[in-house]
Amino acid sequence: MPPPHERAGSDLLFLREESLRLAQTLMFLAARDMAEAVAPVLEEDGLGRAHYRVLQVLAFSPGIPVSRLQDILGVTKQSLGRTLHELDARAYLQSRAGRQDRRQKLLFLSPTGKAAEARLFAVIRQRLVAAYREAGGAAVEGFRRVINGMLSEHSRALLSEESAGRREGREHV
């Protein structure tokens, strides 16, 4: 006989409205607190949240085309263009033409951009390490499964494609 926690329907209290609302509140507060944690670093560098999002994606997916970055961020071409222009003016970006399509613009973080992203990630890393240590390995794996389960099919496809691109050795500067 399976242990009590594995029996069908044995512990579905987490599916109650109250628990789901608490989860929603916790996600909201965690996102807000993480944004507040990196805010001093952003301010020090004269950057905003849009800049940070671009830096995050380029750190995760170096060498992606501008159109792919736009798709991942879910922003307009005009909005992304402004942000990219500002990051380029600060020498945070490098670009190169694609191998197959020379018209394609592939984006990378410059050494300056990598340093800025690393300072921001250090703040996030510190929070995550502390939380992961407190929760333990099984809870961290459960957290990953929950977050993955919340992703849309589109986001899962993006994540899968980006992972495949890294495994295949996407172009690097």
Image: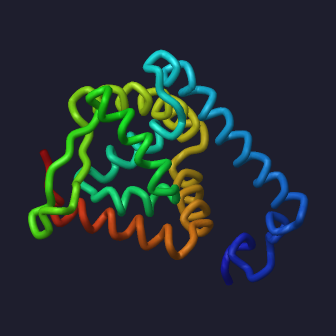
Placement of the C terminus among the 4 image quadrants: top left
Residue 152 quadrant: bottom right
Q: What residue lies at 35% left-to-right and 62% top-to-bottom?
A: 67
Q: Can you say whether 41 is above or below 129 in the image?
A: above
- Identity of the residue furthest to the right in this view: 18
Q: How many marks?
A: 0
- Closest to the observer, 115 or 95: 95
In the rendered view, would you say 148 is above or below 22? below
Q: Residue furthest top?
A: 44
Residue placed farthest to the left in the image? 99
Position in image of residue 61 (x %, y %):
31, 53
Q: Quadrant of the N terminus?
A: bottom right
> From the viewer's perspective, is 65 left or right of 151?
left
Whether residue 23 sits left or right of residue 60 in the image: it is right
Give how far across and how far down residue 104 sits, in percent.
21, 62
26 or 58: nearer the viewer:
58
Q: How is the image coloured?
A: rainbow
Q: Residue at x 49, y 24 (%)?
A: 42
Name the residue rendered at 47%, 43% in the picture: 53
- Using residue 64 as the reference point, say whether residue 21 is left or right of it: right
The x and y percentages for residue 27 are 70, 48
Looking at the rendering, which quadrant does residue 162 occupy?
Answer: bottom left
**Above or below 150: residue 44:** above
Q: Nearer the viewer, residue 78 or 57?
A: 78
Give the camera-side residue of 142 and 73: 73
Q: Residue at x 52, y 59 (%)?
A: 74
Q: Which x, y percent locates residue 13? A: 85, 66
